[in-house]
Amino acid sequence: MKDRSRQEEAGILPAPKIAREQGFAEDGFRLVINCGKNGGETVPHLHIHILAGRQLEWPPG
């Protein structure tokens, strides 16, 4: 992520607000960032998945 901007790195900041708006903040959620070839990223960019709506297990699959 050495070439990513601070604005991109700050992309996770809206996640709690989005979770509240979508109605799943109270029960909890998980944020996932895929980065690099081994993370499944084919085009270099920052994007975040918000996983919610069910009990999530650890470790993730």
Image (cartoon, rainbow, N blue to C red):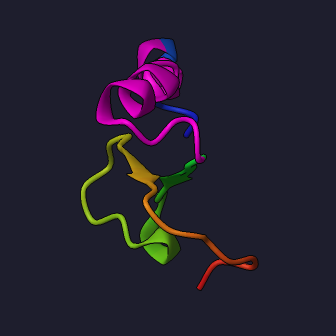
Q: Is residue 43 left or right of residue 56?
A: left
Where's the N terminus, which quadrant? top right
Q: Is residue 44 left or right of residue 58?
A: left
Q: Residue furthest left?
A: 43
Image position, residue 54 (x, y; %): 49, 68
Image position, residue 30 (x, y; %): 57, 52
Where's the C terminus, which quadrant? bottom right
The residue at 68%/77% (across/down) is 57
Q: Residue furthest right?
A: 58
- Magenta residue check for 44: no
6 and 11: which is toward the camera: 11
Q: Residue furthest bottom?
A: 61
The residue at 32%/49% (across/down) is 44
The residue at 48%/31% (across/down) is 3
Magenta segment: 7-27
| Above or below for 35 versus 59 | above
| Above or below for 51 versus 59 | above
Image position, residue 23 (x, y; %): 37, 36
Image position, residue 14 (x, y; %): 43, 20
Q: Is residue 17 left or right of residue 25?
A: left
Q: Residue furthest top?
A: 7
The residue at 45%/57% (across/down) is 51
31 and 7: which is toward the camera: 31
Instruction: Please tell me how many numbered marks the rendered image carries.
Output: 0
* Quarter of the image where one finds residue 21: top left
Q: Main secondary structure of the magenta part?
A: helix
- Magenta residue check for 26: yes
